[in-house]
């Protein structure tokens, strides 16, 4: 009997286009997911079972073009596949659908609140769908949805806790790459924001400066005490 496996006939990630060649509409569509990715890279530096894609194509069907979220997170997959890294995210190779997809909206809407949301639910089964619209005024700029019985339900909270990921996601003013504005951040279970890489560097530099000042102050006091003892003809 002939053993037929359709996966053997599907193209590999090396044979598929790397992206859909659609440029991002603005810088935020790259910077916001890049910040989330770099923060995870530090917080989960000892974990190798996750991958965060930024503007990377997800192939779900060998006969269909890739869909390209601004960012997505997968758990239970290899963080690095090899030294050439991933060219795209191919579901029949990864065997794991992303658990979270992120869309950052610019002035040009591309169905993020309608067709894309329905696509992620029906075709990919992505558990969490995050939409960030910095230009929104009458409603919240950040919406986080959870897939329940095939439909996305809007979650409440600020930040929003994501138990399957073990992190929360929310928005807050901060500094990234020297830019002061509202960014998306990860949060721990107590609702404390996880510091971005440059914030950790700044914190370490401030700690070093403080410790150095303390060291200098102690040495100065020691010298003063030594001089006083010598004035009293006491050998320090």
Image (tube, grey):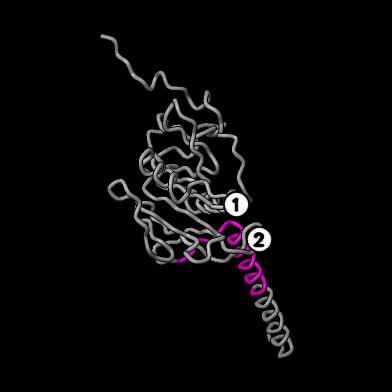
In magenta segment, residue 210: yes
Q: Main secondary structure of the magenta part?
A: helix
Q: How many residues crowd around disc 2 within 10 Å: few (fewer than 14), some, or many (20 or more)?
A: few
Q: Position of residue 146 (x, y in %)?
A: 35, 53
Q: Residue 201 lies in what quarter of the image?
A: bottom right
Q: Position of residue 118 (x, y in %)?
A: 39, 45
Q: Quadrant of the N terminus?
A: top left
C-alpha span from label 1 to label 2: 10 Å
Q: Residue at the spot x=67%, y=81% of the render?
A: 221
Q: Residue at the spot x=39%, y=63% of the render?
A: 189
What's the mark number on residue 179?
Answer: 2
CB-based contact (under 8 Å), mark 1 and mark 2: yes
In magenta segment, residue 16: no
- Under circle 2, the secondary element is strand
- The total of numbered circles placed on residues is 2
Identify residue for label 1: 31
């Amino acid at each position: 009997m002939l053993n037929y496996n359709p996966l053997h006939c599907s193209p590999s990630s090396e044979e598929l286009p790397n992206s859909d060649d659609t440029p991002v509409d603005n810088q935020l569509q790259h910077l916001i997911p890049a910040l989330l990715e770099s923060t995870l890279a530090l917080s989960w530096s000892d974990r190798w079972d996750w991958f965060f894609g930024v503007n990377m194509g997800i192939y779900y069907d060998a006969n269909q073009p890739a869909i390209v979220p601004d960012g997505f997170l997968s758990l239970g997959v290899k963080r690095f596949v090899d030294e050439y890294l991933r060219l795209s995210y191919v579901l029949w190779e990864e065997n794991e659908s992303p658990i979270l997809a992120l869309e950052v909206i610019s002035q040009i809407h591309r169905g993020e609140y309608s067709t894309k949301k329905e696509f992620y639910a029906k075709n990919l089964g992505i558990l969490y769908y995050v939409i960030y619209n910095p230009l929104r005024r009458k409603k919240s700029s950040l919406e986080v949805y959870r897939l329940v019985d095939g439909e996305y339900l809007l979650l409440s909270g600020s930040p929003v806790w994501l138990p399957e990921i073990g992190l929360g996601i929310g928005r807050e003013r901060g500094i990234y790459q020297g830019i002061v504005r509202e960014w998306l951040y990860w949060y721990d279970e107590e609702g404390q924001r996880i510091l971005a890489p440059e914030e950790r560097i700044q914190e370490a530099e401030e700690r070093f400066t403080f410790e150095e000042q303390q060291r200098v102050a102690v040495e100065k006091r020691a010298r003063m005490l030594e001089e006083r003892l010598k004035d009293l003809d006491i050998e320090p």
